[in-house]
Structures are given as C-alpha cells and as structure tokens.
Image (cartoon, coloured by chain):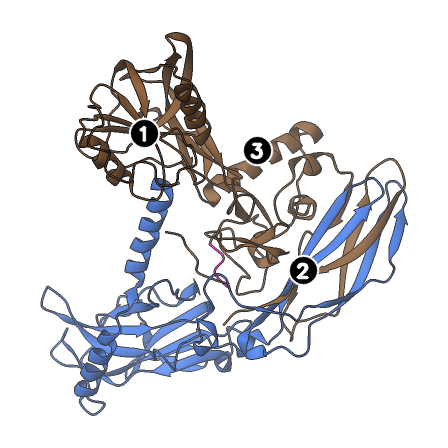
Chain colours: A brown, B blue
C-alpha cells in the first residue's frame, strides 16, 4: 500500500519557501530484523545463522534437532508443493528444510505436517526475504538462499546438521539485494511542483526500507519507510558539514541539491533508461562526500521557471570557486521529456 | 486518469517527448581561485505542447569541473498560464448544498465541493439581509466559521476522489447567529497567482437560497427546491466519495502499512 497521489501534491510544511524538502530513495538492500540461532555440522563447528520466524510463531527452544531436506536440488521452484510419497518416514523430531516458491508456505507446511513434521525452515528463492506463514502446531522460519544452499550442500554429502535455538534469542540482521526498486525514488515520495511553482524536494536521501534503532519495548530495531527516514539522513550530513567547516556556517540547500546525483526513473516495478523528473527527486540522491568536500558552490540550488506568464527566458546562476586553484568548467543541458499533469 | 478528467494524474504521469531548449553564453569557462562568475542561460519552453494539460518541463544543467567535481542544477516550470487552471471541479462534481440531519435532531447545511488544484484562499461567505461587511468587492453578513481557509490543497484521487465539506449551523465566524430569513452561501476560491483583493481573480459559486424558520431549523428554499437537492444528493451517493476524514484515515492506515510491511 503506497501513496501515489501524483503531481501538485508537495507536503506541508516542507513545501514552504526556505524549507528544505527531502525526497525518499529506496535502499539498495532490503534488511530484515531476524533472530540468531546456532547449528553444528557432524556435531562440530558451532556456527550462527539468522532466521525470520513466522509472524504467529513465538521463539522456541530447540536443542539439537537434525535438519532434513526434502530435495537436494536448490533450484527446484516447487520444492515441497506435492504431497510426499507414502513411504516417507515419519518427520517428527526433525526440522524440514524446504525451498520457498511456487505454492504457498502453508501448502508446503501441510504436506510435511501429514507426516508428523512440527518444525519447518524455508530457505529463500530470488524474492526479497519475508516472514513465512504457518499453521497451528508447526514452528516455521525463513533463512537466506545462501544459508539454505550451504546446508543443502552439507546434507547432500551425508553430513548431519543440528540446530540449536533459544527461546530468548539475540537479534540478527539479514539482508537481500533489492534489484527491483533499490537505488531509485520511492514511489510514495511526493511530487511537486507547489501551487506557486516551486520545485520540491530539493534533494533526496535513503528513506525506503531503512534499518535503525527503535524503542527497546518495541524490539530495539525496526525497518521503516518514509521521508521521516530520509530527512534525518540529511540532518546527519549537515552535522558532518558543520564538523568539517565549523558550526557557525550557514548551509545553503543549494550545496545539497547541486551536488546530488540524479537517479533514473522507477515506477515500482522497473527502472527506465531516463531520469526521474526534477519534480520527483529534486537534485537527486544526496552525496555526503561532495557536500562536505566540493570547493565549488552553485547558486541557486534549483531554478523554478514558473509559468508562461511569469516566464523569463534569461535564467541566471552563479559559480563560486572557493578553492585555492583556478578551475575550468564545462556546461551541458540534460533535458527531460515533459510530463503532463492532467 | 489521463486527459479524460481534470484531476492531476496519479503516479506516474504521462510523458511527452517535448523538452526545454537551453542555450549557454559559452561552452566552458575558467574561474580563478576565490572568484565568482554569473552564467546567463537562455531557456525556452517547447511551443507544441497542450497547455490545457499543464505540461511540466524540467531537466538539469550539468556542470563539470577540472577538479572532477560534478554538479546538476535542476530546473522546472509549467508551459501554461497557471491563472487559467481550473481550481474548482464545476463539471464533474459541482459545488452543492444539502441538508445535513445531525443525530441531535437539528439540521444543518452541508456545503460540498471538490478542488482540482490548491488555492491560497477559499472563502465561504453568507449573504442575506442584515448588517453588511465588504469582503473582496462583495457585501456579506460574515463567513462560515473557520473560513476563509488558507492554503487548501487539491483533493486527491486514490481509489476514489475526495471532496471538501463545510457544515453551516446558522452562525457566522463572528459567533453571531443569523435570524430567520433567506440566505445564500457565496463560495470563492482564489486562482493560482490571483490577486487576493480582486474579486475577478476568484472562481465563485452562489448556493440556492437557504431559508431559516423558527430559529435553528434550516430549510432550503422551496423555489430552488428541496426536491432538486435531494435528488441530486441521491445521484451523488451512487458514486461514493471519500470525505476528507476518510482520506485522513486512509493516509494513517497507509502509513501504518508502510511501517508494518517494510
């Protein structure tokens, strides 16, 4: 569920003049707050792994139950989707390792539950990690595709893997790459212009799928999305800037917008070979290094052209060389196709 | 939604191939240490765009320096006259009054309208006989409480378009309760870039006559016909509309979902 309200919907109060408005960029990785478990291979090498329990599953104590794989093929898209052969031995007392995909988590669980299984671990396919669903009486969790492949490899060599879980587990962060929307503007980020034709946001920052600390009573860590995540990122960059240049400097938002890196357009399903419009991303993704270190300043930071009545053909900006050497500059116009509002 | 409606398009809006043309006074420039240069570009909007669809023209001026510093100066504007852009949805959801029966047994007037674009001043003034005050070139008795309203956003269109609602119980923003009599509501929304002191720069709508008899009871004058209003209200209920309150709840839920399903 996302907000896609379209153009002319810049949010108050950041749509004010001299207020810096921050757009949201989606994280290139999708983190998850997981739990930490331990495992042994042939009763040796006590290692840790991260698992995402099903939402309705409370942490449980498991001390040394063996893993059992339905299939050693880690690319079988429909692993566990068919009822198991009648001659399959009873699965109670084992943890069933099943690849995610094709049919639902619950279908896979029901197929092994028929043979007495009470513990299931799914290993991920190419999708972003997610908490699995389960049925009453079955403990279910998800691990990464990499963890699954490692276990399957060991099991296929005849090794025994035993899992040890605590009912008061430590937190662990696991991540998957976001190849679909990562590194592009979040689709929930508001589009300008304002009704007065100011351009917002000035700049954008990571704000989609952001891992941060959270009230201890609510789990200590959380992954949230919104410009409420992007804005403190900019605050952090301003702190870096003050650390480098002194706290009495006034930071003009033009440093943020003109040193940012414009991002390609993504509609939530794919990335296109053209830039996202200025009214969606402003200058683009903020570049902290450039903000702090660049010795050239461009002003103003955005050029609102207004409408046809107020339009001025001559548009001016200044380039300040605040460095200690002479600098040579070249110019290029990067045009964007027009957008129609209605 | 496209061009079959006057609402701004949902995400993502349609693209057109036309873009701005930019001419630089020079292709390159050397600036001495500690010095500042002014660059005066010539920019023109494309001439072949459909101004009725409010084309937004944007892009970047890319500046590369010999110190390997790279800058992108964003620009953007609209290739139309914003003052001509319709604020109020007079075509698909014209402003309308109806009787609002409260649970406490008293009835009130409900005024409903939809905004396709934001307005910096929306006035809801009451006209009728009594002590007159001048408000932007028109004599009025006063305004509906909490009006004029400033910097109102356009309505949104998510699954259903929303609208604005104001309730009038017969009192003015001066706390004066109007006596029995005939009244109208004058709705005015300032056009974008309009002069707030010039009545011609507002879109306006005058309601049918509202007759108040026996104190708090409010009845729409039968000459403009209660029947008409009722029928119209029924028509409207056939295509349900999210109110601002519903929209607000929706936004909260949406935010919740964002948090709940990262």
Same subunit: marks 1 and 2: no
- Categorize mark 3 by other alpha carbons within 10 Å: few (<14), some (14-19), many (20+): few
- CA gap, disc 1 and disc 3: 48 Å
- Looking at the image, is mark 1 or mark 2 nearer the viewer? 1
Q: Secondary structure at mark 3?
A: helix
Q: Is residue A229 visible?
A: yes
Circle 1 is placed at which residue position?
Answer: A70
- Please give the chain letter of the residue carrying mark 3: A
The secondary structure making up most of the magenta span is loop
- Depth order, front residue of B189/A179: A179
Q: Let me know if residue A10 is in the magenta part.
A: yes
Q: Is residue B259 magenta?
A: no
Q: Which mark is residue A236?
A: 3
Q: Does residue A183 appear to the left or right of B87 in the view shown? A: right
> Measured from the top left, where is residue A261 in percent x and y?
66, 46
Whether discs 1 and 3 lie on one chain: the answer is yes
Q: Position of residue A32 (x, y in %)?
A: 41, 32
For disc 1, the chain is A
Residue at mark 2: B59
């Amino acid at each position: 569920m996302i907000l896609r309200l379209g153009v002319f919907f810049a949010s108050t109060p950041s749509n004010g003049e001299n207020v810096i408005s921050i757009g949201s960029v989606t994280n290139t990785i999708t983190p998850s707050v997981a739990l930490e478990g331990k495992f042994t291979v042939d009763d040796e090498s006590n290692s840790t792994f991260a698992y995402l329990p099903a939402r309705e599953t409370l942490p449980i104590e498991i001390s040394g139950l063996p893993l059992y794989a339905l299939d050693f093929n880690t690319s079988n898209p429909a692993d566990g989707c068919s009822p198991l052969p009648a001659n399959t031995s009873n699965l109670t007392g084992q943890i069933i390792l099943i690849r995610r995909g094709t049919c639902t988590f619950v279908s896979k669980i029901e197929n092994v539950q028929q043979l007495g299984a009470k513990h299931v671990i799914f290993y991920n396919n190419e999708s972003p990690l997610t908490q699995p669903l389960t049925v009453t009486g079955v403990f279910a969790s998800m691990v990464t595709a990499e963890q699954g492949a490692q276990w399957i490899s060991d099991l296929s060599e005849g090794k025994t893997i035993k899992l040890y879980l605590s009912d008061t587990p430590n937190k662990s962060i696991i991540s998957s790459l976001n190849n679909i929307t990562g590194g592009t503007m979040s689709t929930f980020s508001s589009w300008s212009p304002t009704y007065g034709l100011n351009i917002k946001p000035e700049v954008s920052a990571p704000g989609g799928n952001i891992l941060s600390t959270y009230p201890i009573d609510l789990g200590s860590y959380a992954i949230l999305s919104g410009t409420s995540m992007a804005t403190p990122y900019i605050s952090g960059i301003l702190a870096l800037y003050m650390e480098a240049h002194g706290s009495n400097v006034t930071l003009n938002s033009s440093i943020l917008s003109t040193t940012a890196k414009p991002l390609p357009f993504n509609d939530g399903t794919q990335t296109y070979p053209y830039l996202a419009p200025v009214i969606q991303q402003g200058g683009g993704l903020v570049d902290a290094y450039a903000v702090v270190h660049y010795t050239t300043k461009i002003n103003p930071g955005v050029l609102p052209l207004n409408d046809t009545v107020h339009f001025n053909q001559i548009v001016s900006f200044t380039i300040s060389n605040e460095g200690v050497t002479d600098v040579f500059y070249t110019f290029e116009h990067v045009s964007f196709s027009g957008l129609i509002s209605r | 939604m496209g061009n079959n409606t006057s609402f701004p398009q949902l995400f993502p809006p349609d693209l057109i191939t036309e873009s701005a043309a930019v001419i630089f006074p020079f292709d390159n420039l050397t600036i001495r240490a500690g010095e500042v240069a002014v660059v005066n570009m010539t920019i023109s909007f494309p001439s072949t765009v459909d101004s009725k669809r409010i084309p937004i023209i944007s892009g970047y001026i890319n500046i590369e320096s010999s110190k390997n510093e790279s800058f992108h100066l964003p620009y953007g504007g609209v290739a139309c006259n914003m003052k001509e852009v319709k604020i109020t949805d007079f075509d698909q959801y014209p402003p309308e009054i109806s009787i609002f029966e409260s649970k406490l047994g008293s009835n009130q007037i409900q005024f409903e309208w939809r905004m396709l674009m934001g307005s910096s001043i929306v006035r809801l003034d009451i006209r009728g006989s009594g002590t007159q005050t001048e408000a932007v070139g028109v004599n009025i008795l006063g305004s509906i409480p909490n009006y004029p309203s400033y910097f109102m956003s356009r309505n949104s269109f998510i699954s259903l378009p929303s609208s604005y609602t104001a309730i009038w119980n017969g009192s003015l923003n001066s706390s004066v309760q109007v006596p029995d009599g005939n009244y109208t509501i004058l709705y005015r929304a300032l056009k974008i870039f309009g002069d707030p002191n010039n009545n011609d720069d507002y879109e306006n709508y005058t309601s049918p006559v509202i007759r108040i008899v026996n104190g708090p009871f409010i009845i729409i004058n039968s000459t403009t016909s209660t029947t008409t209003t009722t029928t119209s209200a029924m028509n409207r209920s056939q295509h349900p509309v999210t109110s601002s309150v519903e929209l607000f709840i929706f936004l909260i839920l949406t935010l919740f979902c964002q948090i709940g399903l990262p």
